[in-house]
Amino acid sequence: MQIVLEGIDLRVVRLPLAEPFVTAHGTRRHREVVIVRAVSADGPAGWGECVAEPEPTYWPEYSAAALHVLEHHLVPRLLDGRSLREVRGNQMAKAALECAALDAGLRAEGRSVAAFLGATRPVVPTGIALGITRTVDGLVDAVVRWRDRGHRAFKLKVRPGWDVEPVRAVRDDVGDEIALLVDANGSYRSDNPDDLATLGRLAAPDLGLVAIEQPFAPDDLVGHARLARQIDVPVCLDESIGSLGDLDTALALGACGAVSLKAGRVGGLVEARRVHQRCRDAGVSLRCGGMLETGIGRALNLAVAALPGCNLPPDLGPSSRYFSTDLTPAFDSRGGTMIVPSGPGLGVEPLAEVLDDMTVSQRTLRAAT
Ligand code: MG
């Protein structure tokens, strides 16, 4: 694929969330992301979304830093024909730029991102991620509400003090008809006996969890490996896996029974494809993780979720779950499933008027002529 780029537009957009989202790290009411547009010399433009959050609490990158590294280090290299690999880390910024450039190329070829990745499913199941609620009843009500709309898989955020009790309440109320996993975002400690006891209780067979995601800090692969030997529920790694190299280390240690795959966190679609293949070769389950993406990132996630190795519930719901107004035409769900875009590239584009309305700042970098 040969794409000649004329320039790159970088925009910061800010969308109000449909409802506040609470995790181990805090409460979010807006989603602010960097949107990248790759302008090709003689073909369609391509789009990418940088999934970095405003604060570096999930991942070291954050949106203002990602914008800076894009503007001053990544875009100039790309427009100059140099490799993005010269820059260390900064996976989310790299992934957004790679996605925009690839999207432009794939649109020109009439090929979908799903086909590029090797996705095989035209339709994928939804998975609804639910944050920490004020009360246990509030959480159970939320699960029931989504279950009644046809959704059959849920990810519950947990942290010390909000774990076994709410998960048990959900399981007792809803029964075995739903798939459940929990995500701790690294909020437990592998050297704390109370935390280990709690995780053991979360892994009890009657709770029927399909995975426990990122119980410990990202760099605590040894702790994850130890836990994986003690419980029967797969330990799913998210923040620990920033590259294929991280995955190989986790596999060598036996730290990883499943991977939450996010193209942004591993540095792009090409690396995501490699991570997916390595997991399949190793017999490790995958799930498509989410970062409260707008429609641009959601289109990409639908393609990732459609990969043959993604056999665990994704973080994937209709646009209305997250935003009252999305950047793209809204993605809808039907009976707990969503359709994977099959059009060229990402298969969707931002709505120009909505994009302009939500744009906080914008700059354009042009290739030298
Ligand atoms: Mg996670």
Image (cartoon, rainbow, N blue to C red):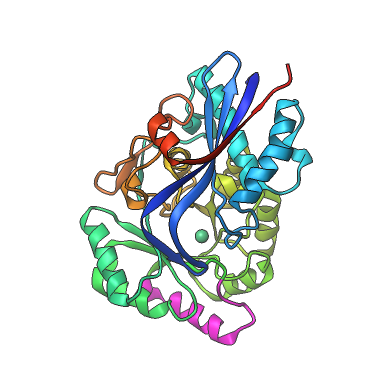
Instruction: Please tell me how many numbered marks the rendered image carries.
Output: 0
Does residue 69 sit above or below 146 in this rendering?
A: above
Does residue 207 sit above or below 150 in this rendering?
A: below
Query: In which quadrant is the C terminus drawn?
Result: top right
Q: Is residue 157 left or right of residue 175?
A: right
**In front of the other: 300 or 11:** 11
Does residue 298 sit above or below 254 in this rendering?
A: above
In magenta, the rendered stretch is 187-207
Q: Is residue 59 left or right of residue 212?
A: right
**In front of the other: 141 or 278:** 141
**In front of the other: 122 or 345:** 345
Residue 290 visible in the current orientation: no
Q: Position of residue 8 (x, y in %)?
A: 61, 29
Q: Which picture quadrant has residue 4?
A: top right
Q: Position of residue 103 (x, y in %)?
A: 54, 28
Query: In which quadrant is the N terminus drawn?
Result: top right
Q: Is residue 145 left or right of residue 42?
A: left
User: Which residue shows up at 36% across the image and 76% down it?
Assistant: 166
The residue at the far left in this view is 148
Q: Position of residue 174 (x, y in %)?
A: 25, 68
Instruction: Check residue 102 for magenta coloring.
Output: no
Q: Main secondary structure of the magenta part?
A: helix
Does residue 260 sit above or below 122 in this rendering?
A: below
The residue at the far top in this view is 42
User: Which residue shows up at 58% across the image and 39% down it?
Assistant: 96
Residue 252 visible in the current orientation: yes
Instruction: Check residue 199 for magenta coloring.
Output: yes
